[in-house]
Structures are given as structure tokens and as C-alpha cells.
Image: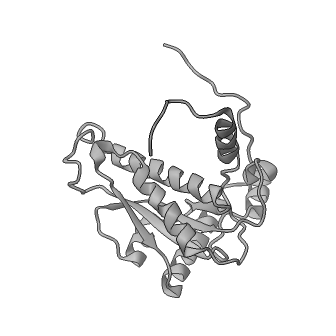
């Protein structure tokens, strides 16, 4: 493909802005199966992500078996109960009403890890900041997320989990660090407003605050 300039059209920029606005954390999914060709296309976007030292430290597990899914859901339920116990008053009331996972319904579920022991990239850029490998995986997930949304699919990031228990249940290498457990499929609805904001849990800043030194 010929690259003829550094700028894209105004229409493209407008569509990109809309795509980012509609990239929501989805917890409510329809039962419609996900087309495997579309899923592969979106997963391939991970390979386009930047990675420190070109280490490509992302490791993707597709959670298919009922046993593995049940273990992950049980993990969430225990962690979620512990989290609820940490709140009181109005916060506890709102928290108890939040739907914080789509694990019961999402047709596709993934666990994405960072391989902290990878030798790919020969340590370039990770000697002083080894966490850059994990940041690289997060960047890859962001590209994957946007690709899914462009295909009409949604992604939910489940962070209310015990990572060590999940690692044992999924039998992953000791050097793999869990970045996130993900549910994906066709969202029940699309909105520019995060569900946590809709439910009154928190509000977003109206503008980016920048400090100067």
C-alpha cells in the first residue's frame, strides 16, 4: 500500500473520534455467536502494537472449556464479594447493583498475559523499566479493543479477580503476568457514556488536566 502523506481526511478523523468514543467496557452481551473470521482479523491487530525492544510479550489464551470458564467465574464471584465488603453506605448500595462482568453470557473469553521472561527483544528498553513489557501488552489490547468496536463487537475487561488463583486454574507459566481477563461478543446496546457513569458510580473529567514544570 502506497503511503502518500502524513495526514488523513477530515472524515476519517471524525470516524476515528467516534470509534474511540464508542469504545466502551461492555458487560451485557447478546447470545449471537462471533464470526471466527472477524475475530481473527481483530486479534491480528495485536501484532500491529508497539512493544518495547520489539519483544512482543503478549500471550493470549482462549478460554473455551466449561471447566476453565466456571473456575474464572467462581474466581470473580469470590473477589467481587470481597470488594463489596470493602464498601459501606451509598457506595455499597450502588456497587451491589452494578453488573461488573459479562462472563455468564459472553460467547468468547480470553485471558491475556505478559511474558516477563521473554528473551525476544534482548531486553532493549526493559532494563531500566521492565514494566514496559506489560505496558506493551496493554497497548496491544487497546488496538484489539478498537478493532472489535469497528466490527460491531464489544469487549469487557474483568479486573475483579485473584490473578494467582486464575494462573493456577489455567496452568500458566510462572513468568506470565496476568494483564486481564476479557469477555467479548455483540453488545446489547451501544453508548458513548460509560456504564459506571450512567449508574452514578463516578463521572469523567470534562477536560484533560495538564501540569507544567
Q: Quadrant of residue 76?
A: bottom right
160 and 140: which is toward the camera: 140
Measured from the top left, where is residue 48 in percent x and y? 42, 50
Is residue 46 toward the left or the right of residue 78 in the image? left
95 and 157: which is toward the camera: 157
Is residue 123 toward the left or the right of residue 197 in the image? left
155 and 69: which is toward the camera: 155
Vertical placement of residue 97 versus 205, above or below:
below
Q: From where the camera sits, is residue 131 visible? A: no
Vertical placement of residue 5 versus 150, above or below:
above
The residue shown at (70%, 28%) is 207
Q: Residue furthest bottom?
A: 66
60 and 94: which is toward the camera: 60
Measured from the top left, where is residue 156 in percent x and y? 62, 61
Vertical placement of residue 128 versus 36, above or below:
above
Measured from the top left, where is residue 36 in percent x and y? 54, 74
Q: Residue furthest top?
A: 213
Q: Quadrant of residue 47?
A: bottom left
Q: Quadrant of residue 149?
A: bottom right
The residue shown at (59%, 67%) is 183
Is residue 57 toward the left or the right of residue 149 in the image? left
The residue shown at (75%, 41%) is 203
Vertical placement of residue 121 versus 11, above or below:
below
Amino acid at each position: 500500500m502506497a503511503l502518500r502523506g502524513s495526514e488523513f481526511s477530515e472524515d476519517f478523523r471524525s470516524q476515528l473520534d467516534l470509534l474511540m468514543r464508542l469504545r466502551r467496557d461492555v458487560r451485557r452481551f447478546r447470545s449471537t455467536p462471533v464470526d471466527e473470521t472477524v475475530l481473527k482479523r481483530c486479534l491480528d491487530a495485536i501484532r500491529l502494537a508497539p512493544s518495547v525492544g520489539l519483544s512482543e510479550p503478549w500471550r493470549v489464551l482462549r478460554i473455551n472449556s466449561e471447566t476453565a470458564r466456571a473456575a474464572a467465574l467462581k474466581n470473580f464471584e469470590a473477589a467481587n464479594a470481597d470488594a463489596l465488603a470493602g464498601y459501606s453506605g451509598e457506595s455499597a448500595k450502588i456497587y451491589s447493583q452494578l453488573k461488573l462482568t459479562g462472563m455468564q453470557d459472553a460467547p468468547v473469553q480470553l485471558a491475556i498475559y505478559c511474558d516477563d521472561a521473554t528473551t525476544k527483544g534482548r531486553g532493549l528498553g526493559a532494563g531500566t523499566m521492565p514494566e514496559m513489557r506489560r505496558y506493551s501488552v496493554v497497548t496491544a489490547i487497546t488496538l484489539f479493543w478498537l478493532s472489535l468496536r469497528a466490527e460491531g463487537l464489544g469487549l469487557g475487561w474483568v479486573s475483579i479477580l485473584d490473578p494467582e488463583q486464575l494462573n493456577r486454574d489455567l496452568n500458566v507459566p510462572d513468568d506470565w503476568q496476568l494483564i486481564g481477563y476479557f469477555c467479548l461478543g455483540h453488545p446489547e446496546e451501544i453508548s458513548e457514556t460509560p456504564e459506571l457513569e450512567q449508574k452514578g458510580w463516578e463521572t469523567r473529567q470534562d477536560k484533560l488536566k495538564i501540569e507544567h514544570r
